[in-house]
Image (spheres, helix red, strand yellow):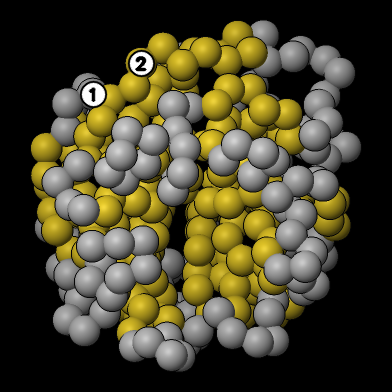
């Protein structure tokens, strides 16, 4: 992995709180601050790949002590990988995939809207069947979402929507080659977009994409490292952080600095983690990096929130 030569960041884990351990398998997290409170969403199920997944939403006033705010179920479906998206209208949006059946499994992206983080109501299907909208973000009055094909031919696709519900193809083939899938997506105030894209299969190195408005044309840099469960966060000073699972030896969930100019990841700190682990959510608040993630390093697969201090 490579690093930027200037203003080198350092990171230290200052606290870790186990917040989700009531199910046999608690995993695939996201974290957000909304209306002055913390919300953490994750999947509860029997195992990593069982067909009984529900979404648990926890809430907290201080980011350390959490209580249940909601449980979201969908009859006949395994709900997977919830992702929060704060909306310009002040509501909170949640995306997740409904997996149905076995051999083959079909996937449909669902979304929910909520004002208080607790009453989520009924979902609305968005996008296209078997194109999983993994990560989305609002910028300049529009929501952009990166989806990936869950069956061949494999590709990543960029969607755009002015209401967050009616997702239209914006870049039908955002990336192809290998098996592109999970992603992180952020925007600079000047409109520059960055996408951190996971790949699996024979060509399993992650890609960093960059585009200017209107986001029709993207340039990609091969990062030369395999990651899982990626997410991106832009710090107030413009530097980019990634939360990922690293697979270069001992499996772990880590926070990395992203070289936005040359491409590259530099591991800043590994969170207490191991085995079945990753899928972090990142929030910058009160001059601390708050990270939700899941891990099985203590035996059962549980959800944690870590506080990380940054310097440099």
**Residue assigned mark 2:** 15
269 to the left or right of 109: right
- Is residue 20 visible to the viewer in this orientation of the structure? yes
Q: Residue at x 23, y 57 (%)?
A: 44
Q: Residue at x 65, y 87 (%)?
A: 152
Q: Which of the pair 26/77 is nearer the observer?
A: 26
Instruction: Name the image quarter holding residue 177.
Output: bottom right
Instruction: Name the image quarter holding residue 39.
Output: top left
Instruction: Name the image quarter holding residue 75.
Output: bottom left
**Where residue 270 sits: x, y (%)?**
55, 26
Task: Say what secondary structure mark 2 lies in.
Answer: strand
**Where residue 4 sits: x, y (%)?**
82, 24
Mark positioned earlier in the residue sequence (1 or 2): 2
**Residue assigned mark 1:** 64
Q: Is residue 294 above or below residue 78?
A: above
Distance between the Cα atoms at labels 1 and 2?
9 Å
Q: Is residue 61 above or below residue 212?
A: above
Q: Which of the pair 212/149 is nearer the observer?
A: 149
Q: Residue at x 83, y 31 (%)?
A: 2
């Amino acid at each position: 992995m490579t690093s930027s030569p200037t203003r080198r960041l350092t990171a230290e884990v200052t606290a870790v709180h186990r917040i989700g351990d009531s199910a046999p398998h608690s995993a695939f997290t996201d974290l957000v601050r909304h209306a002055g409170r913390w919300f953490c969403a994750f999947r509860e199920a029997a195992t990593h790949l069982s067909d009984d997944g529900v979404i648990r939403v926890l809430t907290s006033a201080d980011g350390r002590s959490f209580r249940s705010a909601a449980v979201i179920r969908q009859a006949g479906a395994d709900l997977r990988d919830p992702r929060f998206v704060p909306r310009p209208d002040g509501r909170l949006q949640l995306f997740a995939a409904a997996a149905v059946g076995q051999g083959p499994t079909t996937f449909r992206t669902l979304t929910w809207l909520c004002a208080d983080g607790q009453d989520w109501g009924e979902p609305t299907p968005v996008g296209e069947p078997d194109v999983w909208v993994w990560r989305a973000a609002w910028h300049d009055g529009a929501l952009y979402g990166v989806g990936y094909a869950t069956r061949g031919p494999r590709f990543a696709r960029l969607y755009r929507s002015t209401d967050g519900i009616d997702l239209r193809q914006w870049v039908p083939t955002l990336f192809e080659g290998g098996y592109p899938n999970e992603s992180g997506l952020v925007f600079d105030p000047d409109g520059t977009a960055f996408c951190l894209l996971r790949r699996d299969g024979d060509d399993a190195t992650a890609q960093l994409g960059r585009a200017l408005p209107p986001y029709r044309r993207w340039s990609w840099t091969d990062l030369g490292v395999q990651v899982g469960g990626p997410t991106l966060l832009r710090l107030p000073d413009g530097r980019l952080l990634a939360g990922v699972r690293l697979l270069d030896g001992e499996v772990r969930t880590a926070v990395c600095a992203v070289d936005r100019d040359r491409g590259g990841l530099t591991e800043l700190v590994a969170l207490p983690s191991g085995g079945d682990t990753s899928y972090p959510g990142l929030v910058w608040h009160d001059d601390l990096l708050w990270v939700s993630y899941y891990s099985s390093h203590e035996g059962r697969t549980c959800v944690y929130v870590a506080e990380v201090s940054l310097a440099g």
